[in-house]
Image (spheres, grey):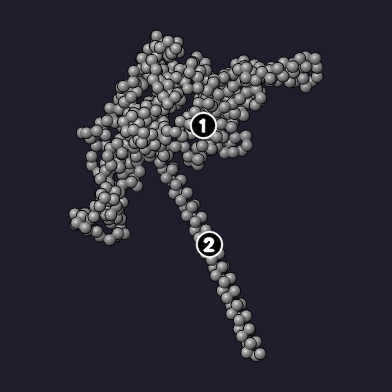
Amino acid sequence: YSNNHSNGYNTFDNTKKPIAPWLDDTNDFSQQSQTLHNDRQLPDYPQPQQQSRNQNYNSSSRGYSGAGTDHGRNPYYQRPPPPPIIKLHNEMVSFVNLMSPTEEELRTRDVMVERVTALAQRVFGGKDKCLVLPFGSQMTGLCLPNSDIDFVIRFPDENGKDEGSTKKNNTAQKGEQKSKTTSANSGEEEDEEYIIARADPLNALAKAVREEFGVLSKFETDVTTPTNSAGTTLTTSRDKNPIKEHLSYLEVISQTRVPLVKFTVAPYDIDIDVCFNQPGGPESAELMHRFMYSMPPLRPLTFVLKYFLASREINKPFTGGIGSYLLQLMIVSFLQHRSREEINDRGRSASLGTHFNLGSLLLDFLELYGMDFNYVTTGISVRTDGYYFPKGSTDKKPVFWQPSRPFMLAMENPLDITADVGAGAYRIQMIKNVFEHAFKTLMAYVSEPLEETDSILAKIIPPTEEMEKRRVFKMVSNIEEAVVMASSGNGADVGDDNRNNEESDDEENTRKRRKKKSRKLSSKKRRS
């Protein structure tokens, strides 16, 4: 486990890039020390062997953190590499920082939410006749750069949640039958149009989406900057040659457990899923907010595992994969049982999940769902601090037991205990094997005998060109932000200096006036 490999590249090769974009070369202390020594920015220090005679390792400084020593400034001192499990933790933190969406990306997604909301309201009769609610990672803040935006459109009349509006509509229809004015006839035509759209909402919305965003033909070469209805530009600063806004993918998926309209808007490559009259979407986002507040490791684990599944294309529920909501419930259940084990082992004073090592948590999660968990007999619930239940029990069997697929993951929906969130993940056996393989792969690099590697996390999450672009983009953005802050700080300093100069001038003038006045008084006294 050489120190030259501790940060993902050769310490003495300044031109070599990290093998994984989330590795930060600024953490290589030995290289910084060598550079400082070569530039003569620090004086020559004695070798550590000579200096150790004068070191005082008292009870408050045991030599581990450099307190009481000059190791922090000694260019000859090379910090030992961190333990592999700490290195994995640091890589996960850096990965989350790298893949978190930027402010510009969040603004683009927010504008897209507004456009889809306005489009759906135009198709189905306005705010009073349909509720357009975004949910999922867009609302929880757990979205990756390529995460889709989920919507649920609800019709209050059909769900029976707005009986008053239904009675008003019936009364209005009777009044329209009596009155034969032109306005009433136009209102009837509009109502009929909305009724037809709500009778087949999937195809009605797909048609409106095609008209809203358009389809770019293969012979079209227009290069324009796409904007929304308010004139807001939706391109990013990285797009040097933005192409015309268009649909790169559109599909109506009706033969599935949750029918939906799925489309992708280019050039932003934002995937959008729209379903109808499905309960629990926005409520689940609120639930995840509460879990994230009480379980800090939930967010970084979700980021890493979501990308882990997406890189293997096993993250879509309609293809038998593990969706975001199911994955988050699996992580919540794991953290609940992990906290309970910590309390039982260490007592009530044990940490309740706020200081766990992310590398250790990732390994334990992969081990649990890849090797230890019994999918055939056991179901999962996150209610009342989390517990397991037998799938074959009398009250659970009708919902969670599938005779043709006994291996399915049974995950109780905390918002509706009669619903199984894991019912659509029919590829769970293959996913279980993927978890097991990832666990054994990571164990080869964090346990004895150690395998040397530049990046431990890169063994299960393949680095991509897009990651490298994000690293460069964020680095440039940070430099620009630092320059702006520095310039504003200098301006503030200049303003302070000007104010100080003005104050000093005022004090000097006041002093002169007082001195002149005192002279006049003294001269008057002498005359008297």
**Residue 400 visible at all:** yes
Residue type at numbered disc 1 = Met
- Write the residue at 77% across / 20% down: 184
SS at badge 2: helix
Q: Which residue lies most toward the top here?
A: 403
Residue type at numbered disc 2 = Asp
Give the number of marks. Answer: 2
Residue 246 position in % (x across, y down): 54, 29
Residue 64 shown left or right of residue 334 in the figure: left
- Write the residue at 68% across / 20% down: 165
Residue 171 shown left or right of residue 197 in the figure: right
Relative vertical location of residue 379 with respect to residue 343 in this rendering, above or below: above
Q: Residues within 10 Å of mark 1 (few under 14, many from 20)?
A: some
Q: Which residue is mark 2?
A: 496
Q: Which residue lies most toward the front here?
A: 348
Q: Which residue lies most toward the bottom here?
A: 527
**Residue 319 visible at all:** no
Q: Which residue is mark 1?
A: 139
Disc nearer the start of the sequence (1/2): 1
Which quadrant of the rendered structure holds the C terminus? bottom right
Q: Residues within 10 Å of mark 2 (few under 14, many from 20)?
A: few
Q: Is 458 or 67 nearer to us in this picture?
A: 67
* Marks 1 and 2, how far apart at CA: 43 Å
Residue 344 shown left or right of residue 229 in the figure: left
- Write the residue at 30% across / 25% down: 437
